[in-house]
Image (tube, rainbow, N blue to C red):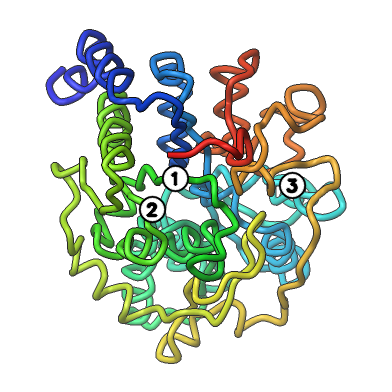
Amino acid sequence: MKYVDEFRNADLARGLARAITQAVAPGHRYNLMEFCGGHTHAIARHGLRALLPPEIELIHGPGCPVCVLPIGRIDQAIALARDHGVLLCTYADLMRVPASNASSLMKARSQGADVRMVYSAIDALKLAQQHPDREVVFLAIGFETTTPPTASVLRQARALGLRNFSVLCNHVLTPPAMRGILGPAPGNETSAHLHGFIGPAHVSTVIGSEPYRFCADDYHRPVVITGFEPLDVMQAVLMLVRQLNEGRAEIENQFTRSVTPLGNQKAQALMAEVFELRDSFEWRGLGSLPHSALKLRPEYASFDAEQRFAAPYRAVADAKACECGAILRGEKRPQDCRVFGTVCTPDNPIGSCMVSSEGACAAHYTYGRFMTDMPTIAEKPGATA
């Protein structure tokens, strides 16, 4: 199979593993955070940790859009469907994310709320056209990857003059989350033992590589943008090890077959036309981050579900037994959570990290719940890179 099997070649993977082992400097450690749930899934699925020397630690970050959405946002959506009688549409993964009072969108549906799973934003738009007598709300989530399709649908709705369609916008941005992980200001890093980032693939096809420049310039942390295949990830690790050995902090692009420095400027223009920055937005595990999410511009206010309906957002604390927040910050492993794999499973998730296939807990449960080597940022603080 051309262009897939080539990136899963076992001999090449072993060759990269040998090159990485040879490149590791004696007495040094390399704590590398993959900032994409797709990378977490690929690393677990293909057993890449087993190919790496013990000096290298791959740490999961807040790169799963379902995982980072706080409970209060799910509660807000449930309130729209239950109390306002809207036809609420969203993606399948979000349906089972636990909300307050042991609820979820799936449970709200079973209790009579009209909540429907869709494959895309355009499906929600079609439902609004098919049901002109109903208020249809699309619960939009995701990073920069899924934001342009939402913008495109909003532009279509405006052109069609639809009056019964709106969006509950929860689109978030990757660079501010990376800044939130590193710390509020250079020299005051909260993750001093995090040495570099495996940069996201799909997000970078939209925004390009330049938005990560602050990681290198302000925090002296290298970023290597890479694809999702095993050889992509292995090559990115080798590139990061070489940068750290040489004392460099640069933004490198391993995923040149899809990512350019400036990204998809047409998609960016569409996003800028429809959305603007929120002053702040709450992330699960990271708290409220400034300018880290999007809202609809005033020109599209009539399509903003938050303005159209009286369903205010209220912050809600995570379940006490759930360690999703610490896992998203890279401070704990899934198996450090006392309910992981027992009370909390994909069939009965207690936290969002066990729901989405891109979540660290779901990936670890599916491919390696009996392994004990998933690292955290805080381990071996005396090591250097």
Mark 1 is surrounded, within 10 Å at the Cα level, by few (under 14), some (14 to 19) or many (20 or more) other residues, namely many
Secondary structure state at the residue bearing disc 2: loop
Vertical placement of residue 296 versus 261, above or below: below
In space, the residues marked 2 and 3 are separated at their CA atoms by 35 Å
Q: Nearer the viewer, residue 147 or 199?
A: 199
All told, the count of numbered labels is 3
Taking 319 as reference, is 17 left or right?
Answer: left
Circle number at residue 195: 1
Coordinates of residue 260 in the picture (x, y in percent): 16, 55
Q: Residue furthest top?
A: 11
Taking 122 as reference, is 9 left or right?
Answer: left
- Which residue is labeled 3 in the image? 98
- Residue at the image point whose x is 33% and y is 79% from the top: 160
- Which residue is labeled 2 in the image? 221
**Mark found first going from the N terminus, 2 or 3:** 3
Which of the two marks, 3 or 1, is nearer to us in this view? 1
Which of the two marks, 2 or 3, is nearer to us in this view? 2
Q: Nearer the viewer, residue 5 or 149?
A: 5
**Mark found first going from the N terminus, 1 or 2:** 1
- Residue at the image point whose x is 45% and y is 91% from the top: 298
- Residue at the image point whose x is 36% and y is 81% from the top: 158
Coordinates of residue 179 in the picture (x, y in percent): 48, 63
Residue kind at label 2, given as amino acid type:
Arg
Q: In the figure, residue 150 lies in which quadrant?
A: bottom left
Q: Is residue 139 visible?
A: no
Coordinates of residue 177 in the picture (x, y in percent): 50, 61
- Marks 1,2: beta carbons within 8 A: yes
Residue kind at label 1, given as amino acid type:
His
For the C terminus, which image quadrant?
Answer: top left
